[in-house]
């Protein structure tokens, strides 16, 4: 069967996909081109394709891709992990095909082609956090938005302190007197002595209460810079330019900032709302694969917070929709007195894993992905969700190229003790769990149940 598409020039469409997606056959049927994965992994090719063509990612479940390509499911998952970042950042449209190698599959691809707008023609998406006392700030998501930094700085600010890390590589211009303050890479930068050092350097430069801090980087940088801004001169303005997926959909939004102690993650911090959040999608193109997948772990939780089929959306819209969910929750609960706790979905185990492993050994999003599957196992044992819902958690995590099992090297008793030290644990161990009324905070006193769920979540990914 041949299906033609007349809505755009055939020469402007290119299909990409993992082994088993059948893009060569689909391209021939539809009169378009297919790109090999070597091209997809070439940064120069991706830039050229994004500037001149409309890129459609033809995707399917790992099981279906494995069956179509004749490889093991574990191999299909490895392909996904390896190429997830490149495929996601370059795709203008995504189609999840459930019936590969059929006329219906070709029609599904054609339908997405006919409705896809290239990302180069898509303006930035603007969301906002709005509090009831007339405070609020914009969240701007798109390619090239960092160039608009000057538009979001306080009018009276004379000095702009750019807090960033050596490997970020994004140069920003504020149009004011600015100085770059580098901090170490990784979670180890989130320390109290680093806060003091930055504040001293600000003071020596002559920063006043009217000036502004700008973070350029991921969640570590925004956590640290936000906390320094909240304490310097008892609080000065901060703008976050977020360059990682995890930062754009979570860490930079909502005003929670802080540093770690040896006893736990984010145990010293504050609520300090930024003046603006700029989510620079261009910066995601160069993220290392593991860092990109880590962001996907945080994004996965939004599937269960009202995000629906986020994996069917192009990247800018996916980030914007996730940011809107967080913005809406934060707007109604600034200081985590109630509903905002749902944003910690998957985080009770995640923080315990990070602490037990040592910061930096396990990426935050990797830990959250494991935490989501574990939370589903706990909820299932409490009768809150059925087995099919647990499998949906595993499917989402796997689809984002992440593992969902608790590594066998962790000690169950140690993890459960760390649950009790989590900052949400006020009157006992508290989890955020899925259920008939959606995701909500639940006290869980049954340690044997928690231990049993850990056993079930160890090695839970099939393949």
Image: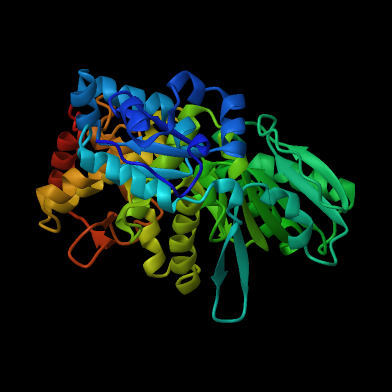
User: Which residue is drawn at the image coordinates 67% and 51% (left, top)?
Assistant: 145
Furthest residue to the bottom? 133
Q: Is residue 245 left or right of residue 15?
A: right
The quadrant where residue 165 appears: top right
Inspect this view and state whether residue 62 appears.
yes
User: Which residue is drawn at the image coordinates 62% and 43% (left, top)?
Assistant: 221
The quadrant where residue 239 appears: bottom right
x then y, percent, for residue 308:
31, 56
Colour pattern of the rendering: rainbow
Nearer to me, 382 or 69? 69
From the viewer's perspective, is residue 380 above or below residue 462? below
The quadrant in which the N terminus is found is top left
x then y, percent, for residue 86:
48, 31
User: Which residue is drawn at the image coordinates 17% and 43% (left, top)?
Assistant: 391
Inspect this view and state whether residue 360 appears.
no
x then y, percent, for residue 340:
41, 65
In this rendering, the count of numbered labels is 0
The quadrant in which the C terminus is found is top left
Nearer to me, 224 or 243? 243
x then y, percent, for residue 256:
54, 57
User: Which residue is drawn at the image coordinates 55% and 32% (left, top)?
Assistant: 287
Q: Is residue 106 left or right of residue 217?
A: left
Q: Is residue 162 left or right of residue 446?
A: right
């Amino acid at each position: 069967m041949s299906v033609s598409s007349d809505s755009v020039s055939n020469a402007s469409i290119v299909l990409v996909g993992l082994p088993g997606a059948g893009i060569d056959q689909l391209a021939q049927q539809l009169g378009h081109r297919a790109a090999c994965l070597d091209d997809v992994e070439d940064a120069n090719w991706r830039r050229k394709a994004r500037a001149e063509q409309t890129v459609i990612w033809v995707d399917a479940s790992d099981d279906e891709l494995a069956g179509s390509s004749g490889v093991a499911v574990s191999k299909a998952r490895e392909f996904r992990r390896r190429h997830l970042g490149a495929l996601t950042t370059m795709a203008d449209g995504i189609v999840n095909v459930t019936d590969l190698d059929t006329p219906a599959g070709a029609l599904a691809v054609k339908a997405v082609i006919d409705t896809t707008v290239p990302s180069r023609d898509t303006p930035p998406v603007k969301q906002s956090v709005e509090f009831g006392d007339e405070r609020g700030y914009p969240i701007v998501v798109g390619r090239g938005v960092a160039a608009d930094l000057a538009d979001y700085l306080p009018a009276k600010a004379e000095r702009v302190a750019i807090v960033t890390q050596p490997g970020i590589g994004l140069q920003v211009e504020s149009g004011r007197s600015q100085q770059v303050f580098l901090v170490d890479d990784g979670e180890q930068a989130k320390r109290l002595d680093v806060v003091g050092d930055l504040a001293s350097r600000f003071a020596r430069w002559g920063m006043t209460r009217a000036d502004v801090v700008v973070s350029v980087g991921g969640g570590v940088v925004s956590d640290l810079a936000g906390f320094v801004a909240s304490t310097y001169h008892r609080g000065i303005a901060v703008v976050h330019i977020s360059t990682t997926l995890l930062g754009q959909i979570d860490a930079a939004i909502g005003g929670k900032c802080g540093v770690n102690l040896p006893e736990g993650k984010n145990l010293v911090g504050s609520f300090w709302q930024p003046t603006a959040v700029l989510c620079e999608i261009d910066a995601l193109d160069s993220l290392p694969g593991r860092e990109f997948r880590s962001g996907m772990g945080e994004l996965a939780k939004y599937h269960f917070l009202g995000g629906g089929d986020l994996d069917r959306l192009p990247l800018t819209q996916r980030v914007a929709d996730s940011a809107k969910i967080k913005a809406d929750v934060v707007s109604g609960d600034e200081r985590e007195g109630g509903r905002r706790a749902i944003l910690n979905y998957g985080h009770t185990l995640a923080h315990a894993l990070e602490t037990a492993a040592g910061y930096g050994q396990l990426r935050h999003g990797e830990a959250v992905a494991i935490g989501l599957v574990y939370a589903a196992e706990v909820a299932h044992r409490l009768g809150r969700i059925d087995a099919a819902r647990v499998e949906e958690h595993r499917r989402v995590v796997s689809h984002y190229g992440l593992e969902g099992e608790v590594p066998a090297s962790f000690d169950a008793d140690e993890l459960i003790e760390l649950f009790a030290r989590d900052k949400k644990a006020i009157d006992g161990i508290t989890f955020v769990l899925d259920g008939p009324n959606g995701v909500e905070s639940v006290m869980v006193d049954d340690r044997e149940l928690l231990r049993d769920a850990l056993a079930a979540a160890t090695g839970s990914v099939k393949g």
